[in-house]
Amino acid sequence: MKRLGLKLSLNDPRWGKDNKPQANEGKKPGEGPPDMEQLWRDFNQRLNGLFGQKRPNGDNNGGGDGGGGNRPDMSGGVRATAGAIGAVVGLIWLASGSFIVQEGQTGVVYTFGKVSHTTGSGFNWRWPYPFQSDETVKVSQMRMVEIGYRGNIKNKQTRESLMLTDDENIIDIQFAVQFKLKDPVAWLMNNRDEEDTVRQVAETSIREIVGKNKMDFVLYEGRDKVAFETQQLMQQILDRYASGVLISSVTLQAVQPPEQVQIAFDDAVKAGQDRERQKNEGQAYANDVIPKARGTASRLLQEAEGYRSMVVENATGNASRFKQVLVEYQKAPAVTRDRMYLDTMQQIFSSSSKVMVDAKTGSNLLYLPLDKLIAQAAATDAQAAAARAAQAAGGAPAASTTLPSELMPSVEVNRTRDSRSRESLRDRESR
């Protein structure tokens, strides 16, 4: 401040001026305009004093010796001023070429509008404008585009979501695509509108996949397959476009029929479910009835086969027995007849519940109902056992074992005469 000759007194009318007399010294403020030449000389003198330059003839003061009034040489000061200003401007211009790339980003440097190289994260420098320019791209950020809706699935975009299936049905699909960049240079140079390109490729891909499948397949069991095939087809198309995009996932947000036919479609789905349920019930009933019917048929066939075998064998045995009896009868007719008679009576009485007993005196026959007696004895034993068990359990008195009168054996005496005699037997044997 002292070298520049500045004074800090605000009351001094010559504040900011040197101590040498000036051309307008002595004038009162406001009496006339300032001397512009004198102001310019003062400015140059201060610059010369700042940079240590001497005036011609060794004069460093504001005026000539003895008041000569010679003008100072201003060419050196102007050159110094222009050089300083140029140096400052040059430094600022060079500093404008520096830029910082954040972590997860890549810097792309252009030389006269053409990509020259890429830079990593950190501090970088390039030639300032107009020689080079730079642009940073986020390569690690996961980006997303929405097809069929914007922000919320309720905010539908029907022009994007309505699609035609292979069975000529219309379906409403809303999905999102997540992707990131694998080549920032291709992302910047080969795409006019990057996200719109990805959106159009996604819409084209899913329309192709849906057009190859049935409506029921897309709505239910084929949703994951549709999403996977759409992702693969999108990646192939974007690689052919050299867009520098890597598809991470395709997520189906909503897959449904159009709202105009939603109620009718729900009724059709319910009818189909009822049909499947009835088919399952009928199949279950058939699985229960058919094996039983087949088992019954097999059993009847086996029983019929057994009965046939029995009848055939009995007939064969009877025929063989008849032949054997015929041979014996031819040898001894009387003995054979008696034997046949006894065998027949034995068969008859073995299946009869009545026993005829011949009395020693007279021709009285005693009838004994042995079957009723046997049944009565069994009933008596069962009743007695029950009474003993009840008495042992509760101490109740045993029931009476007296039989009712209707269960008592009845005796019937038949008086018949024996119509057969020994003479008649002899006559039959002789015949």
Image: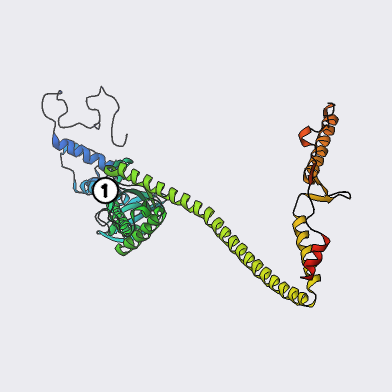
Q: How is the image coloured?
A: rainbow
Of residues 195 and 153, which is closer to you in this image?
153
What secondary structure is found at the residue carrying circle 1? Answer: helix
Percent of width and height locating residue 100: 37, 49
Q: Quadrant of the N terminus?
A: top left
Name the residue carrying label 1. 89
Q: Nearest the camera: 192 or 292?
A: 292
Q: Position of residue 313 (x, y in %)?
A: 67, 70
Residue 102 relative to residue 5: left or right? right
Residue 22, image x, y percentages: 18, 32
Vertical placement of 167 versus 73: above or below? below
Badge 1 amino acid: Val
Q: Taking the image as drawn, is residue 247 in sight?
A: no
> Relative to 350, is 101 on the left or the right?
left
Q: Please give the name of the residue rendered at 64% of the width and 70% of the height, measured from the top-left corner.
A: 312
Between 348 and 303, which is closer to the camera in this rendering?
A: 348
Quarter of the view holding residue 134: bottom left
Relative to 357, is 202 on the left or the right?
left
Place of residue 304 in the rendered image (x, y in percent of width and height, measured from the top left): 60, 64
Q: Residues within 10 Å of mark 1 (few under 14, many from 20)?
A: few
